């Protein structure tokens, strides 16, 4: 008798077993990617020399509590699994950028909810205690930045869950930080700001003035629509710029200061109003804890000094280990030399700036 039917059944069983094993492996890998780890590549030098451009690392999602629904942070769904721990000072954290960019960022947490932060040139103070720079951090301009208010960053309180914030009581820096905070806690709602210009105590919702350094172009600041409307008198062409696109309070402060200078004889004053889905926000109860993040390359890092707090709702993972590293300056045809072999497998250490420097592997 022929054994062909048995052979075919054996082949089918073997194929079924192979597909079953492959399917199980893929499901486990998908679960790990969604709930356990996040791969991240260092794109800029903001964390040098702790992390270098071209480093590839893994972050642990479950440490801070992975979202229950995959990719739900992008959809505005905030439910998470219980966290093993909350971010603490010294952790290197992967988070979603709080402003208009959808990219993920990585910085070192230097202060948590309820703490105060102050910077005096190269000195960072948290709750009045000076924190030292991370062992491999650096300054490339001796702590001097372009904006004097960053060089001497006055005392700032980091909001915690349950704090009540009234935006009308905030100055520009804290106001823009608050805008980002409320956006992070309510990502599906439309958060907008209206910058109200008062001249001699009277609200002026539109005025014409030259754009700074742009020759003959004349612009209209239409504060009712919260935008700048530009018109070239030679061509009549219009252009628009929404003030809500500013993420850095220093950039916004420079623009508003220049605008006020144009009306210096009319006692100019800007007032700020914040809206959620078109309704004014007069008081807000903070839902989640917030954190202050800074790059280890202190003079070359766009971080919380500029755009404010990172809300726990936007925290994604704790940086854990380097699994690969490529030197961006070495060409690919020299691949063996392009790989930074000595960095592969290095753990990414937390360091709070107070206790003794940890042993670096």
Image (cartoon, rainbow, N blue to C red):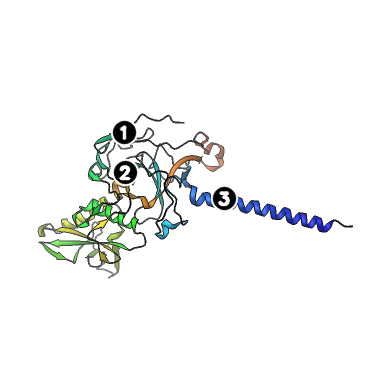
* Disc 3 secondary structure class: helix
Q: Earlier in the sequence, mark 1 or mark 3?
A: 3
Residue 218 x %, y %? 23, 64
Q: Measure the alpha-carbon separation of dots 1 and 2.
A: 16 Å
Depth check, mark 1 against mark 2: the one in front is: 2
Q: Reply above or below: 336 against 314.
A: above
Q: Looking at the rendering, which quadrant does residue 235 occupy?
A: bottom left
In the image, residue 1 sits, relative to residue 160, either above or below, namely below
Query: Which residue corresponds to mark 3?
Result: 28
The structure residue drawn at horizontal position 56% and vertical position 37%, both measured from the top left corner, is 336
For mark 3, does the 10 Å Cα neighbourhood hold few (<14), some (14 to 19), or many (20 or more) residues? Answer: few
Percent position (x, y) of residue 210? Answer: 21, 61
Question: Badge 2 is on which residue?
Answer: 112
Point out which mark residue 132 bears: 1
Image position of 225 with respect to 1: above or below:
below
Seen at 40% across and 59% down, the residue is 77
Circles 1 and 3: CB atoms closer than 8 Å: no
- Specify the farthest residue to the front: 82
Image coordinates for residue 149, horizontal then vertical, percent: 23, 45
Instruction: Assign a secondary structure to mark 2.
Output: loop
User: Are the residues flagged by discs 1 and 2 in contact, CB closer than 8 Å?
Assistant: no
Viewer-nearest of discs 1 and 3: 3
Q: Quadrant of residue 122?
A: top left
What x and y, as percent, mark residue 254?
23, 52
């Amino acid at each position: 008798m022929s054994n062909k039917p048995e052979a075919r059944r054996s082949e089918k069983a073997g194929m079924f077993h192979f597909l079953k094993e492959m399917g199980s492996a893929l499901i486990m890998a998908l679960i790990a990617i969604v709930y356990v780890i996040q791969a991240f590549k260092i794109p800029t030098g903001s964390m040098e020399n702790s992390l270098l451009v071209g480093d590839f690392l893994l972050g642990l999602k479950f440490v801070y509590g992975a979202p229950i629904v995959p990719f739900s942070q992008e959809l505005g769904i905030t439910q998470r699994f219980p966290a093993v721990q909350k971010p603490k000072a010294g952790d290197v954290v992967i988070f979603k950028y709080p402003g208009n960019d959808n990219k993920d960022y990585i910085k070192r947490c230097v202060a948590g909810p309820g703490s105060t932060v102050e910077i005096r040139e190269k000195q960072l103070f948290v709750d009045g205690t000076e924190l030292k720079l991370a062992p491999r951090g650096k300054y490339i301009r001796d702590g001097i930045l372009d904006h004097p208010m960053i060089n001497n960053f006055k005392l700032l309180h980091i909001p915690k869950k349950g704090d009540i914030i009234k935006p009308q009581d905030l100055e520009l820096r804290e106001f823009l930080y608050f805008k980002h905070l409320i956006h992070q806690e309510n990502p599906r709602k439309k958060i907008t700001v209206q910058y109200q210009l008062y001249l001699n105590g009277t609200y002026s919702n539109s005025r014409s003035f030259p754009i700074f350094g742009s020759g003959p172009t004349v612009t209209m600041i239409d504060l009712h629509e919260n935008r700048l409307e530009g018109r070239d008198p030679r061509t009549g062409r219009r252009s628009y710029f929404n003030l809500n696109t500013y993420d850095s309070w220093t950039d916004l402060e420079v623009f508003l200061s220049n605008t006020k200078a144009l009306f210096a004889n009319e006692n100019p004053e800007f007032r700020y109003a914040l809206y959620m889905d078109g309704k004014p926000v007069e008081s807000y109860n903070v839902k989640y804890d917030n954190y202050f993040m800074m790059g280890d390359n202190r003079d070359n890092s766009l971080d919380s000094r500029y755009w404010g707090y990172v809300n726990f709702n936007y925290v994604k993972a704790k940086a854990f280990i380097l699994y690969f590293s490529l030197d961006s300056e070495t060409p690919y045809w020299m691949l063996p030399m392009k790989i930074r072999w000595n960095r592969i497998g290095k753990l990414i250490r937390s360091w709070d700036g107070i206790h003794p420097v940890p042993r670096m592997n």
